[in-house]
Image: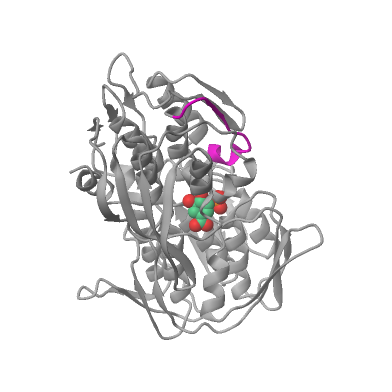
Amino acid sequence: MSSPNTPAEPRSFGRSTALKGTITVPGDKSISHRSIMFSALAIGQSRISGLLEGEDVLATIGAMRAMGADIAHDSETGDWLVNGVGIGGLLQPAGALDMGNSGTSTRLLMGLIASHNISATFIGDASLSGRPMGRVTRPLSQMGAEFQSQGGDERLPIMMRGLCPAVPINYTLPVASAQVKSAVLLAGLNTPGVTTVIEPVPTRDHSERMLRSFGAELNSARDDDGALVHQLRGEADFTPQDIIVPGDISSAAFFIVAALIIPGSDLIINNVGMNPTRTGLVTALLAMGGDIVEQNPRKIGGEPVADLHVRHSDLSAIDLDPALAPLMIDECPIFFIAAALAKGTTRTSGLEELRVKESDRLGIMAQGLKQLDVNIEETADGLIIEGRDGESFAPQAKPTIASALDHRIAMSFAIAGCMSKTGVEIDDVRPIATSFPVFETLLMDAAQ
Ligand code: S3P
């Protein structure tokens, strides 16, 4: 998986008719990863429905199988059945763990392995091999794990050796990262005593919700400075669960923006996860005048869910509140497309984390938007985008946009292509399969 042996797949996306009807997006990627990992730590059988069967989650499944979990697809129901090894029961994997493009798999699994007496080698594709891992190896080293990166640069390939019993730590997150928070908490599962993670800026809380449902003793409370303090008592037993994974708001995001910007659109997106640590994009788009109505709010498997009714809207520019950044971190690329078609100049800041995602999302988005003839200024931590007041993109010639092994860049510019007089060519759409394999089919269906 780490070196795709199929050739690049260029694809053109042209002007689209209005998006209409009802669509359902696949399962949430973050929740899918966690459902596999946590089920693999329970003794007995868990059942997962609505799992995202994208390449990133398949990488997690492969790794958990390599460490002893029995994970099967029930072809009758489409559910996944997982028989776990118990906390502390992970086995030595025989070969390298190939994480493909997936930062979440890599960082969370490093956490899990850190408190086991096993060693593992992590490898990944060119994008993942360029991403910083020091943010997880530093706290996990404090717990006793050892890491060696091939290039001495805290990037993959990395060889690690866990320690059992590991040392519980009290760790304050230096970056707002759910992956780092989760890595330390997962290491704490097989660690005696209490592992503490202090989170000055809240990030997605799927790990906390699901850890509790599996039976972990985890307390989260605010300290005097307003930071969230998570205290996990290690060496608990996990009880198998039946998990229903809600639709991924990060995938729905492309259709929310598409329906807002393509004239005449009137689209319902069913079963979207609306966890408040993930809904920053909806908050931002509502502030821009977007017509997005939450219908049938409900709770499924401990997560808030709703159906979203989205209609074409005249969007106005905003100064994006940097406090929203962690709540829409994966949605910034498609937000920039919305901003580029809004009335007025949108200013964003506090988005430096975008530079260490699957690609440098500030640099690559700025480059692609310039190719679409958008006036744009790139700063160290944001973009300043002059909107086109609803006018379609009108570059001199059809641009070819580099997706840079980044699914969200590919999908953002595919949506931009729907509002471009020339259309847009994406140099390689293969990365879309990491998180949203049915993206193109849903786009065609909704545009019928
Ligand atoms: C994720 C956390 C975020 C997000 C990523 C998924 C997770 O990363 O960008 O796509 O599932 O925990 P960071 O923790 O690096 O912000």
| Res 418 visible | yes
Is 351 included in the stretch rendered in magenta? yes
**Residue pictured at 35% horizontal, 33% vertical:** 413
Q: Is 146 located above or below residue 187 in the figure?
A: above
| Residue 99 position within the rendered picture, expressed as x and y whole percent measured from the top left | 42, 54
Q: Residue at x 43, y 67 (%)?
A: 93
Query: Can you give x and y, in whole percent of width and height, for residue 317 in the image?
Result: 52, 31
Residue drawn at x 43%, y 23% as measured from the top left: 388
Q: Is residue 224 left or right of residue 317?
A: right
Q: Is residue 304 above or below residue 138?
A: below
Give the magenta part as a residue range: 342-355
* Residue furthest top as drawn: 396
State yes or no: residue 161 in magenta.
no
Which residue shows up at 26% across the image and 26% down it? 423
Residue in front for this viewpoint, 238 or 370: 370
Residue 271 place in picture, x, y as percent: 36, 62
